[in-house]
Image (spheres, helix red, strand yellow):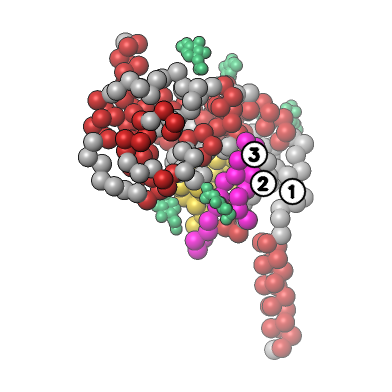
Amino acid sequence: MASNNVALILLTLTHFLFLLAPQTGAQPAASGPANLTGTLELGGQYTTFIRLLNETQQIIQIQSQLNTTTQGFTIFAPTDNAFQILPSGAINGLTVDQKVKLVLYHIIPKYYTLTDLLTVSNPVNTEASWGLNFTGHGNQVNVSTGVVETALNNALREHFPLAVYEVDVVLLPLELFGTKSPKSAPSPKSTTSPKSTPFPKSSNTSAEIPSPAAEADAAPSPSHSKNGAAGMNVRLGIVVGLGLICMGAMS
Ligand SMILES: *[C@@H]1O[C@H](CO)[C@@H](O)[C@H](O)[C@H]1NC(C)=O
Ligand SMILES: *[C@@H]1O[C@H](CO)[C@@H](O)[C@H](O)[C@H]1NC(C)=O
Ligand SMILES: *[C@@H]1O[C@H](CO)[C@@H](O)[C@H](O)[C@H]1NC(C)=O
Ligand SMILES: *[C@@H]1O[C@H](CO)[C@@H](O)[C@H](O)[C@H]1NC(C)=O
Ligand SMILES: *[C@@H]1O[C@H](CO)[C@@H](O)[C@H](O)[C@H]1NC(C)=O
Ligand SMILES: *[C@@H]1O[C@H](CO)[C@@H](O)[C@H](O)[C@H]1NC(C)=O
């Protein structure tokens, strides 16, 4: 009896240590060579992300590193819908460098299973060198950027050297999409002051053009001070408004 218990404890302990131990990448590929494009294409709803990966040359970079990596990669793939719900200027307003950074922010140069992410220590560095935070709740993992937070549910692939997890929002880095002090947005009006332009400075769209959408959003928004949600809504409103104006101008 006693020896059975000892064996059980040892078994549990080794299992636990295994979970805690960083993945060294010693495991062989479990299901053939990792093919990033193929994995995303099979999912069927990541065409925007594939286009961005391609446009920024990252698909070639990652694919060639996948052959030789000992650390592996973890990639968060926003759905097409995640891009559609962004304000229309949000991605097109980025410079080439910023687009690359945004894409790299979705890539961690290390293989993590969802189980690893439950207990990983924050922040986890991405290829953009800005960190992502992971919080585990039971067996549910949330990823947070400081601007957005979402749950990781769907693993498109979870075999070394490549893990690909679906996200239903674009992981907007604080460094590109956050204000410097999100909590100190006192009133919606302050977001129109030149010092706090929330969306990328290099954006071609001028924040001074008043738009009906922005005004409609800004006027009666209840003080929703948590996480500067009100400020974010106003910002989204402004960009949506500008986007609509641009679309109107083009048609
Ligand atoms: C990866 O998958 C894509 C799409 O299915 C295919 O075009 C490409 O040839 C594959 N690459 C490799 C190295 O297997
Ligand atoms: C990737 O971009 C190149 C041009 O840089 C283009 O020729 C190619 O069709 C693109 N591939 C995909 C899958 O979008
Ligand atoms: C990766 O390895 C596969 C075979 O293992 C090879 O066909 C492919 O060309 C390699 N790709 C790169 C980018 O080195
Ligand atoms: C991420 O976690 C670290 C460590 O807990 C914390 O200092 C940091 O503020 C967090 N960042 C965000 C954006 O939540
Ligand atoms: C995880 O993120 C989702 C947003 O997608 C949120 O609704 C949920 O409350 C978060 N879970 C926890 C435990 O914070
Ligand atoms: C602004 O847009 C013009 C053409 O639409 C482009 O040539 C220029 O590079 C853009 N500037 C920035 C900073 O994106």
Where is mark 1, residue-wise? 25
Magenta stretch: includes residue 122: yes
Q: Assess whether mark 1 and mark 3 are in contact (beta carbons under 8 angstroms).
A: no
Where is mark 2, residue-wise? 111
Q: Residue at x 57, y 21 (%)?
A: 96
Q: Is residue 73 visible?
A: no
**Measured Cα–Cα span from mark 3 to mark 1:** 21 Å
Where is mark 3, residue-wise? 129
Q: Amino acid at mark 1?
A: Gly
Q: Is residue 173 visible?
A: yes
Q: Residue at x 50, y 63 (%)?
A: 138
**Measured Cα–Cα span from mark 1 to mark 2:** 7 Å
Q: Residue at x 51, y 33 (%)?
A: 176
Magenta region: which residues? 121-139
Determine whether the residue tagged by mark 3 lies in a helix, strand or loop.
loop
Q: Amino acid at mark 2?
A: Tyr
Q: Residue at x 75, y 39 (%)?
A: 69
